[in-house]
Image (tube, rainbow, N blue to C red):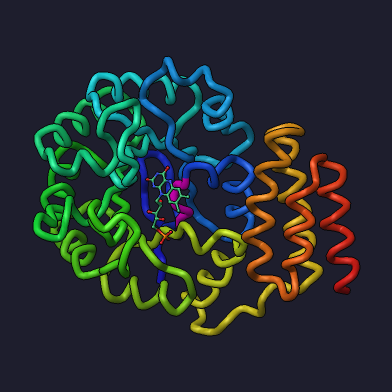
Amino acid sequence: MLYPIPLGQYTIEPLALAPMAGVTDRPFRQLCRQQGAGYVVSEMVTSDPLLWKTSKSSFRLNHAGEESPKSVQIVGYDPDMLAEAAQLNVERGAEVIDINMGCPAKKVCNRLAGSALLQDEALVARILSKVVKAVSVPVTLKTRTGWDRQHKNGVTIAQIAEDSGIQLLAIHGRTRADKYEGDAEYDTIRAIKQAVKIPVLANGDIDSPEKALTVLQHTGCDGIMLGRAAHGRPWIFREIRHYLNTRTFLTPPSLQERADIIYQHVCAVHEFYGEDLGVRFARKHIAWYGEYLDNSRPFVRQFHKLTTRLEQRNAVKDFFAALS
Ligand SMILES: Cc1cc2nc3c(=O)[nH]c(=O)nc-3n(C[C@H](O)[C@H](O)[C@H](O)COP(=O)(O)O)c2cc1C
């Protein structure tokens, strides 16, 4: 049902983890890969190198030990700056450059960026062709179905992207004006898929194996990209893969398997960020894991109060020991 897609010198499996700022850091990307994601994209990195000196950016620029192709998402508004950012990221190990025109954040680098660019198609064209010409690696685009419901220019944007040399599109089934409101719609994604020859991944509200199949069938897309459904449930990639291949449901991970996944994830977050940030990031993931664990509220509440890595690790062990 899902066929591998060539992307430059690589071949990717089009069951992708969506880029999510503050979530899809290296530990989470690696975990989702282990749990069946065939392709992952980094959190967005600003195109302004002056901002790369912040500690946040240094974590975002860290891809050590990850599987190829390492896809790094950049965001900005200025074609030259984005082209330079693409080159610098390639020098630092990016093997695919993804351009963010999907994020509804009002301002990046104090200027309109992300999906705000969709109102200026000429600028979109300038950005995409500049970045494609600036690097030898494949360049991909993540975008939405359009600027707003009256100007759903996703098809035009996709054609501009194809003409500019973009090699893969990921389309979130909402306009910029929609932000995250309402349901994702897949008719426009289907129209985009029909309008271009390059591979298209459908994105938006895919949260179960059955939904994955429905969206694939409806849009005719080459693959899917999941974001929020992986919060607290990274094994959803395995579940979807299994369902698409067999039309049967995979047995959910046992309590012991979950305990191992969650413990390893918390340790990986601690290792990656160190004590302070690591403890903070682990809290966020534990809250998400808690949503899929019965009677976990007291544990999650208690976990949020813990201030050291050791306490957090022990709390995870104790919680699962009490359940088994
Ligand atoms: C916390 C969060 C952070 C996000 N950050 C980014 C980002 O950095 N770049 C981007 O292109 N999209 C970003 N998105 C949008 C997602 O990639 C995705 O398009 C959106 O969540 C819809 O997919 P979903 O319904 O599967 O979550 C973000 C979404 C969330 C929830």
Q: Can you give x and y, in whole percent of width and height, for residue 37 in the image?
A: 53, 57
- Report the predominant secondary structure element of the magenta stretch: loop
Give the quarter of the figure containing the N terminus. bottom left
Left or right: 173 as drawn, with respect to 307: left
Q: Residue at x 34, y 72 (%)?
A: 215
Q: Nearer the viewer, residue 311 or 15?
A: 311
Q: Give the magenta range.
A: 16-20
In magenta segment, residue 170: no
Q: Can you give x and y, in whole percent of width and height, for residue 214 in the image?
A: 35, 78
The vertical placement of 293 against 151, above or below, is: below
Left or right: 198 as drawn, with respect to 216: left
Q: Can you give x and y, in whole percent of width and height, for residue 92 in the image?
A: 50, 22
Give residue 80's quadrant in the image.
top left
Q: Residue at x 45, y 47 (%)?
A: 19
Query: Which residue extends farthest bottom?
Result: 248
In magenta segment, residue 19: yes
Q: How many marks?
A: 0
Q: Nearer the viewer, residue 271 or 72?
A: 271
Q: Residue at x 53, y 42 (%)?
A: 22
Q: Can you give x and y, in whole percent of width and height, for residue 299 in the image?
A: 78, 62
Give the quarter of the figure containing the C terminus. bottom right
Q: Residue at x 56, y 72 (%)?
A: 239
Give residue 45's quadrant in the image.
top left
